[in-house]
Amino acid sequence: MDTLTGGTGADRFVLDTNALVADTDTIADFNSGQDDRIQVNTVTGTEDSLVALSLAVLYNGDHANIVSADDNTLVYMTINNVDHQDIINNFDNYFSVI
């Protein structure tokens, strides 16, 4: 488990969905208003939704968990102080798919 923090301005946090075991990274200071994004590397780079990426977002108190859509016990990332519903409703404000 790693705690990730960005600097000033836009930050990119890479989401590793190849993990076979839960090794949750935590983003301490995500700010979509500063163009922070969670980067997901894919084969095609054309996925444009959580469903297409086989991801889901779950409520975790004041935080949001990014989990496998197939197994929500596999938590890839926790984003502190972010409303999970905002991530669900505003995919492009949170993710950069390449």
Image: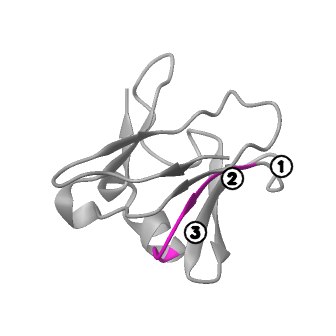
- The residue drawn where x is 68% and y is 46% is 1
Q: CA distance from mark 1 to mark 3?
A: 16 Å
Q: Which structural element holds mark 2?
A: strand
- The residue drawn where x is 84% and y is 55% is 73
Instruction: Mark 1 vs mark 3: give the one in front.
Output: 3
Q: Which residue is mark 1?
A: 71
Rendered image quadrant of residue 17: top right
Q: Which structural element holds mark 3?
A: strand
Kindly give the residue lying farthest to the top in the view shown: 43
Q: Quadrant of the C terminus?
A: top left
Q: Which mark, by number, is residue 64?
A: 3
Q: Amino acid at mark 1?
A: Asp
Q: Which residues are magenta?
A: 75-83
Q: Which mark, by number, is residue 67?
A: 2
Q: Amino acid at mark 3?
A: Ala
State the image coordinates of residue 90 (x, y, percent, origin top left).
37, 64
Q: Amino acid at mark 2?
A: Val
Q: How dense is the environment of label 3, judged by Cα within 10 Å: few (below 14), some, or many (20 and up)?
A: many
Q: How dense is the environment of label 1, judged by Cα within 10 Å: few (below 14), some, or many (20 and up)?
A: few
Up/down of 56 relative to 21, above or below: below
Report if the CB atoms under discs 2 and 1 are less than 8 Å apart.
Answer: yes
Q: CA distance from mark 3 to mark 2?
A: 10 Å
- In the shown orientation, is residue 15 left or right of residue 76? left
State the image coordinates of residue 68 (x, y, percent, origin top left).
72, 47
